[in-house]
Amino acid sequence: MYKRQGLARVTTRQAIQATAGAGFALVVGQLVSGQRWYWAVGATWWIFVNTTSRGETLVRGFRRLLGTVIGIGLGLLVALPVHGDPAVTAALAAVCVFGIFYTAAVSYTWMMLWVTLLAGLLYGLLGVLGPDLLALRLAETGVGALGAALAVILVLPVTTHSITDAWIRRALRCVHACAVETARRLAGAADADPAPRVAELEQLLARVRLSVAPLVHPLNPMLGRKRRARHVLDLLDACAREIRGLAAVAADPEASHDTRLATACRRVEAAVEALTEGRDIALHADGSPHAEPALAHLHGLERALTELARPLRTPSGSPLVGA
């Protein structure tokens, strides 16, 4: 998806969407307030940061609005009674800064809560804080979120499924690369090192979880897609566990160099190709609980890939992968 040109590129589409959303926020924001219209434009811009699909942007907009609502409620309870007292404001501002950085990687909603409360404290220090200003903050944030939502829905939409499919395909190819590299290591290849591939797989799975997040969001009314998305995540996690176990076995210099590894690895390759090309997968794993550890992990990996075929191909709305 990164080698496409023109409007086929996700980044180009998002740039146009962000411009359209900011334009809407600029016009409507000025109608709401001729002095604070930039709050709406800023909200639109920040909602688009680090998002790549319609679903991600909509969820981020909802979280920004929710965090603002909670932050304004805290502002009424905390910032207003302070009346701009410098010492108290400085202490609370320090708490807000800590809260912003502590929650940034955990919850966008909580981060926006602290940002909104910090803004209220600073306006209190300037002597302009009041219920009307907090209400205006909420209104302008709502305008910005609406602008972003309309843009991703109406202007060159990039569906959540198209982005998710691309990341899942990359993760599956990395699963195969990990298995091949580990099999080479177990076969005695001195230059084979599965560790970088395993690290790459972890990064790709993190990106898959991020792209699937809108599908598993509590507010998603499409329960069938939500269940499918969760099932896919569980199976991809199972693949990652088998890959990590396989790499751990390969790191042991005394690990078995069973010749059946090559055959099992070829079946993993076939399963990945079948998943990404929409072909049927036949399960051939015949390992027993007492098989060599490397073979056991390869058989487990093959089973997980085979089970992935069903949720990835279920024709309920847009598919996650495959047609």
Image (tube, grey):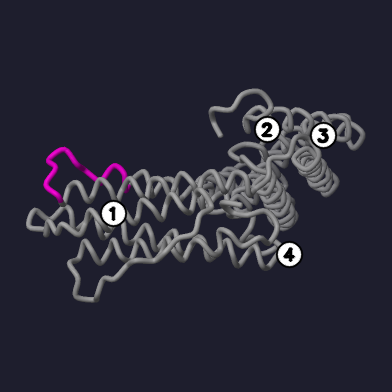
Labelled pair 4, 3 in contact (Cβ < 8 Å): no
The CA distance from mark 1 to mark 2 is 39 Å
Of tags 3 and 2, the one toward the viewer is 2
Residue 18 in picture, x, y percent from top left: 72, 32
Q: Residue at x 61, y 41 (%)?
A: 51
What secondary structure characterizes most of the magenta part?
loop
Query: Which range of residues does the magenta coloring cover?
Result: 187-198
- Kind of residue sitting beneath label 4: Pro
Q: Quadrant of residue 36?
A: top right
Q: How many marks?
A: 4
Residue beneath disc 3? 25
Residue beneath disc 1? 265
Q: Nearer the viewer, residue 239 or 125?
A: 239
Q: Which mark is residue 221?
A: 4
- Kind of residue sitting beneath label 3: Ala
Q: Earlier in the sequence, mark 3 or mark 2?
A: 2
Residue 286 in picture, x, y percent from top left: 29, 71
Q: Is residue 153 above or below residue 216?
A: above
The CA distance from mark 4 to mark 2 is 25 Å
Of tags 4 and 3, the one toward the viewer is 4
Of tags 1 and 2, the one toward the viewer is 1
SS at badge 2? helix
Residue 117 appears in the figure: no
Q: Is residue 231 above or below residue 113?
A: below
Q: Residue at x 26, y 60 (%)?
A: 245
Q: Earlier in the sequence, mark 4 or mark 3?
A: 3
- Kind of residue sitting beneath label 1: Cys
Relative horizontal placement of residue 156, taking residue 35 as reference (left or right): left
268 part of magenta stretch:
no
Residue 91 in picture, x, y percent from top left: 55, 47
Residue beneath disc 2? 14
